[in-house]
Structures are given as C-alpha cells and as structure tokens.
Image: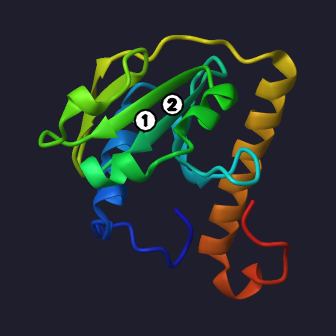
Amino acid sequence: MFAGMDQTVDALPVMPGQRLARGVCRALRAMDFVTVEELVPTPGLRVDVMGLGPKGEVWVVECKSGRADFAADRKWQGYLEWCDRFFWAVDGEFPVDLLPQGTGLILADAYDAEILRMGPETPLAAARRKVMVQKFARHAATRLQALRDPAGFGQGSGWV
C-alpha cells in the first residue's frame, strides 16, 4: 500500500450498479482475475467491469440494478466483440427471465458474487486481445496514478 493511503476504509459505493460491480470484482479476484471498472473499449461503449484472467481471458460484466436499468441498455450487444465471455450481474430481486439466453449470469451484492450461468466462450482474435490487454493496463495504471497523485493527475490526457 502507498504511504498515506488508509487501508481500513471500506466505504460502500453509492449507486446500486456500483455495489454490484464491487461484489463482482471481489468474486473475480477470488478466481485469480484482476478487474477494472468503466473501461471504454471503443468510443460510445463503456463496460461496467472488465476482468483479465490468469491466462489472458477477457470477460465483460454489465451490472444491472433493475428492470428499468436493463431496459435502458441498448448497447450491450456491442460489448460482445470486445471479450471472450459476457455476463450480466444482477441482485437477487432482479427478474432474470428478462436477460437474453446465451449470455452469462452472475448473482451479486456489494460483498460477493456467484456465477450462475457461464457466458459462452467466443475467443477474441489475437490482435483484438492485444488491444484489450493494453487498454486494460493503461486504464488500471491511470486510475492508480490518479489515486496516488490526484494533484498531478490533471497534467496528462485524462482517463483512458
């Protein structure tokens, strides 16, 4: 941990989708994945959680807090070409029959998550995988740098 960073803070995210994302990230970490939130694979798309597995697997998880949140999502199919597996993460109250068949399903809360249905594997082409791993690395490094040095963060080009 960096000097000056409080290791005891366990503040819950404010929005319901952010709480789901936290539980998803914890569960994926237990599976030896590392994660970032709100990564932009291409202009116009922003995934809620991207996981990078120990063998280079790229998973995308969209967190939906309710029926209205899901109904408003018109871009989710655009995420499929940017990952090896795609999942929805929802809480126990979500009407899962709304979710498209042939997609992964994760039951989550703010503290943990469980994969109920594995998303089908559609392996990325090598060139696309390289792009996504680089985007992941730059996104993670930028977030870390902003956390470590908020005053100096504005000197760069912003979030990746």
Callout 2–callout 1 Cβ contact below 8 Å: yes
Above/below status of 20 relative to 55? below
Image x and y of residue 75, in percent: 57, 44
Q: Residues within 10 Å of mark 1 (few under 14, many from 20)?
A: some
Above/below status of 80 relative to 158? above
Question: Can you name the residue that lies furthest to the bottom here?
Answer: 151
Residue marked by disc 1: 29
Image x and y of residue 112, in percent: 25, 40
Image x and y of residue 65, in percent: 28, 52
Instruction: Report the amino acid beneath label 2.
Output: Phe
Q: Residue at x 84, y 72 (%)?
A: 157
Nearest the viewer among 43 and 31 is 43
Q: Residues within 10 Å of mark 2 (few under 14, many from 20)?
A: many
Q: Secondary structure at mark 2?
A: loop
Above/below status of 19 relative to 74? below
Nearest the viewer among 37 and 119 is 119
Task: Kindly indicate the quadrant of the structure image that contains residue 85.
Answer: top right
Q: Residue at x 46, y 48 (%)?
A: 73
Q: Is residue 34 left or right of residue 102?
A: right
Question: Can you name the residue that lies furthest to the left here?
Answer: 93
Display colour scheme? rainbow
Q: Which mark is residue 18?
A: none
Q: Is residue 47 left or right of residue 66?
A: right
Q: Secondary structure at mark 1?
A: helix
Task: Give the quarter of the figure containing the C terminus.
Answer: bottom right
Residue marked by disc 2: 33
How far apart marks 2 and 1 lie (CA) works out to: 5 Å
Q: Residue at x 77, y 25 (%)?
A: 129
Instruction: Report the amino acid beneath label 1.
Output: Arg
